[in-house]
Image (spheres, rainbow, N blue to C red):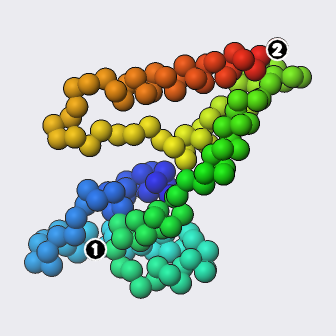
Amino acid sequence: MVTALSAKNKLEFIDGTSQEPSKKDPTYHAWKRGNNMVVSWIVHSVSSSIRQSILWMDRAEEIYNDLKSRYFQGDLLRVSDLQLEASSIKQGDLTVTEFFTKLRVIQDELESFRPDPNCSCDPKCSCDMLSLISRRKTEDHVMQFLRGLN
């Protein structure tokens, strides 16, 4: 959903950067049209059973946050399965490229459940903790790859 909205230059309607202006603001009608377009896209992209629970909402950001809170919760069992699969995967009869791609798909799915944290300090932190976390994750990925090679 984020990718589709970004491609349409409408991401600001769900990420909180485009706040609803007052009804007297000259940009209100343009904002309302954009919001209604995104609401329509979201409503028509979900199953009918989910649609019933969001039809009464009229702000795209509100709908997105509701759906995100319901469906974007990491599944710990799936995370555990992916971690086990990533740690036990072997190259076997695969080419190096096929093996790398297979491992990368697992790592990318894990990343979707557990993305790197973002700093929310104001002002931004001056420590290197986030870069250290990223570097260690990269090292872990390299070690998993090397461990699985024939």
Q: Position of residue 17 (x, y in %)?
A: 26, 56
Decide: is 81 above or below 91. below
**Identity of the residue drawn at 54% across and 63% down:** 71
Asked if 42 appears above or below 147 in the picture, the reply is: below
Q: Which residue is mark 1?
A: 32
Q: Residues within 10 Å of mark 2 (few under 14, many from 20)?
A: few
Residue at image location 15% in from the left, 37% down from the top: 123
Give the quarter of the image for residue 28: bottom left
Query: In the rendering, at what x and y percent does residue 106 appear?
Result: 67, 37
Residue displayed at 40% across by 65% down: 65
Taking the image as shown, residue 37 lies to the left or right of residue 49, namely: left
Q: Say whether residue 10 is visible.
A: yes
- Say whether residue 106 is visible: no
Quote the CA–CA distance across marks 1 and 2. 58 Å
The first of marks 1 and 2 along the sequence is 1
Type of amino acid at the residue the image marks with label 2: Asn
Front residue (pair 49, 83): 83
Residue type at mark 1 is Lys
Q: Name which residue lies at 21% across and 34% down.
A: 124
Mark seen at residue 150: 2
